[in-house]
Image (cartoon, rainbow, N blue to C red):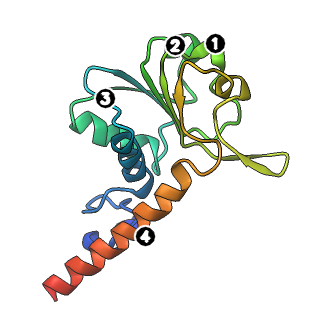
């Protein structure tokens, strides 16, 4: 963290420093995804599964600052599967294959799978296959979902940082 904090806040394109002026790329990408699909988060219960510094923690912070009802689950959470049934939106960024199961997701839920892990030599998300088989939920694609938008968000941050640097120099 000390090395990350040594980067000038206006040049921290990853948005991971304590004083970063840019949002982290994956949370920014998820915000774009939500906006692009006209998903209204106001008044909806949101579960954030995973509290890591790249996705879970910064996205939960951003959404709480926006006034959204966010509950964070991590490896220490008890009865997560049963509790998830109470949430309208589930964002998973735990990096645990098959963590989110169909019987833990309420009817009509929105699921954003931002988790990545390796399983049998392949990159997979946190959402189990049985969830993807349901037709009553909205879910990010298994491939080409959050990842490409994250890359785009990172490039957007690079451009913003460059523009800010040119304006101040």
Q: Nearer the viewer, mark 3 or mark 4?
A: 3
Q: Is residue 35 above or below residue 121?
A: above
- Tell me what residue is drawn at x 69 percent, y 24 percent: 133
Q: Is residue 163 above or below residue 55?
A: below
SS label for mark 3? loop
Per the image, the residue denoted by label 3 is 41
Residue 35 image position (x, y, % from top left) = 33, 42
Residue 3 numbered mark, or none:
4
Q: What is the quadrant of the C terminus in the image? A: bottom left
Per the image, the residue denoted by label 1 is 103
Do the numbered discs 1 and 3 sit on residues whose CB atoms are within 8 Å? no
Would you identify the image quadrant in which residue 130 lies? top right
Q: How much space separates mark 4 and mark 1, taking CA atoms? A: 42 Å
Q: What is the quadrant of the N terminus in the image? A: bottom left
Q: Earlier in the sequence, mark 4 or mark 1?
A: 4
* Nearer to the camera, 68 or 131: 131
Per the image, the residue denoted by label 2 is 106
SS label for mark 4? helix
Q: Earlier in the sequence, mark 1 or mark 3?
A: 3
* Nearer to the camera, 1 or 113: 113
Would you identify the image quadrant in which residue 2 lies? bottom left
Q: Earlier in the sequence, mark 2 or mark 3?
A: 3
Horizontal side, residue 9 vs residue 150: left or right: left
Do the numbered discs 3 and 4 sit on residues whose CB atoms are within 8 Å? no
């Amino acid at each position: 963290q000390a090395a990350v904090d040594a980067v000038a806040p206006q040049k921290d394109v990853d948005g991971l420093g304590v004083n970063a002026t840019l949002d982290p790329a994956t949370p920014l990408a998820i915000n774009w995804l939500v906006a692009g699909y006209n998903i209204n988060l106001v008044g909806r219960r949101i579960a954030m599964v995973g509290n890591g510094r790249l996705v879970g923690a910064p996205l939960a912070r951003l959404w709480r600052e926006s006034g959204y009802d966010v509950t964070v689950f991590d490896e220490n959470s008890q009865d997560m599967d049963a509790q998830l049934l109470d949430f309208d939106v589930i964002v998973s960024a735990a990096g645990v294959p098959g963590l989110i199961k169909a019987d833990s997701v309420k009817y009509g839920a929105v699921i954003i799978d931002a988790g990545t892990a390796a399983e049998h030599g392949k990159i997979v998300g946190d959402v189990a296959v049985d969830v993807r088989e349901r037709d009553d939920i909205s879910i990010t694609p298994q491939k080409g979902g959050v990842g490409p938008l994250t890359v785009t968000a990172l490039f957007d941050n690079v451009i913003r940082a460059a523009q800010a640097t040119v304006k101040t120099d």
